[in-house]
Image (cartoon, rainbow, N blue to C red):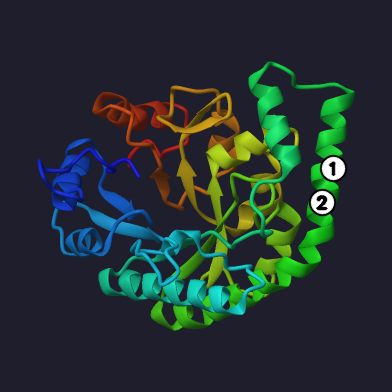
Amino acid sequence: MWSQGRFRPEGANADDMLAFAKAAAGLGFPAIEINYVIPPQGVEALLSNDHVGIVSLHSPTPRIKIANGKSSDALNLASTNEEERVLAVERARVTVDHAARCGARYMVVHLGGIEGGMFREEGELRKSYDAGERDGAEIDVLRRGAVERRAEAAGTYLPLASRSLAEITEYAAPRNVAVGLENRYHYHEFPGPGELRELLDYYPPEVAGFWLDVGHAEVLDRLGLERHDRWLNELGDRCIGAHVHDVDGLADHRAPGHGTADWPHYAEKLPPGVPRVFEINQKVDEQRVAAAIPFLRDRGVLPASS
């Protein structure tokens, strides 16, 4: 994520991923996650780099345009359009192949969501939050409406997401790649905490687990739609990795230390052995990226010796 537009030679239409890998190593990162925005040539460069290791790939990697003009990362693993769902699974399998090539143990998966995009109620909650309106009767109506809308539609879409997960894990498991299901930024997306437990009960931890995204957990909490501490309190035993970034209001992907995320909670509840991927956006300067490492180490989110 952080590489986007930061390593683009003059006249080029893509970033130099070897330059990014060298910069990441220089900033103190021993390994990286290949983000789903990286095009094929960038993925190939990262797979062959000798600057940093690769701990995970964010599916679907690489980003390509498909026949209908969509980007591969716009495909919905819970789509009622079977052609789209199958294609989404196919792109996830490509990610598995790349992970297996470089020995990456993990792939991060967005499991899809209810078609139609962000709920109107969530959009109104976001506007209200930004306007300083966090509570009240109208806010409660919007929250209840979002919960009811999601519950009504989940019966149609969640089984499709579950089917896609089964197809991905069937391909990934024999290739020694674990599927990390990420908690999502928008409320119409899967899975919620209860759904996640039910999904993971079908799989051993080495096949599939939970990938915590700190920013997404914080944002849905601030909207009053899902408590941020539910994820690790209820699913910490299935957590296999995390995206760590800070949140300023509803804006996530900030460098840790430049927001108000509940770092004491994550320090206490994140399993000690799982990777922490710094998913920081491309607008953050190198100094803040580098400073995020000692910031999280001082707060116990990173082990003292890593």
Disc 2 marks which residue?
149
Residue sitting at x 19%, y 43%: 25
What's the distance in space between the residues labelled 1 and 2, CA to CA?
A: 6 Å
Label total for image: 2
Disc number placed over residue 59 in the picture, else none:
none
In the rendered structure, which amino acid carries the disc numbered 2? Answer: Arg
In the rendered structure, which amino acid carries the disc numbered 1? Answer: Gly
Residue 30: percent from left, percent from top:
25, 47
**Label 2 crowd bin: few (<14), some (14–19), many (20+), radius 10 Å:** some
Mark 2 and mark 1 in contact (Cβ < 8 Å)? yes
Residue sitting at x 48%, y 30%: 246
- Against 193, residue 68 (above or below) is below
Q: Using the image as rendered, state which of residue 71 and residue 106 is in the foreground.
A: 71
Residue 24: percent from left, percent from top:
22, 42
Residue sitting at x 41%, y 72%: 67
Residue 302: percent from left, percent from top:
42, 38
- The quadrant in which the N terminus is found is top left
- Label 1 sits on a secondary structure element that is helix
Disc 1 marks which residue?
145
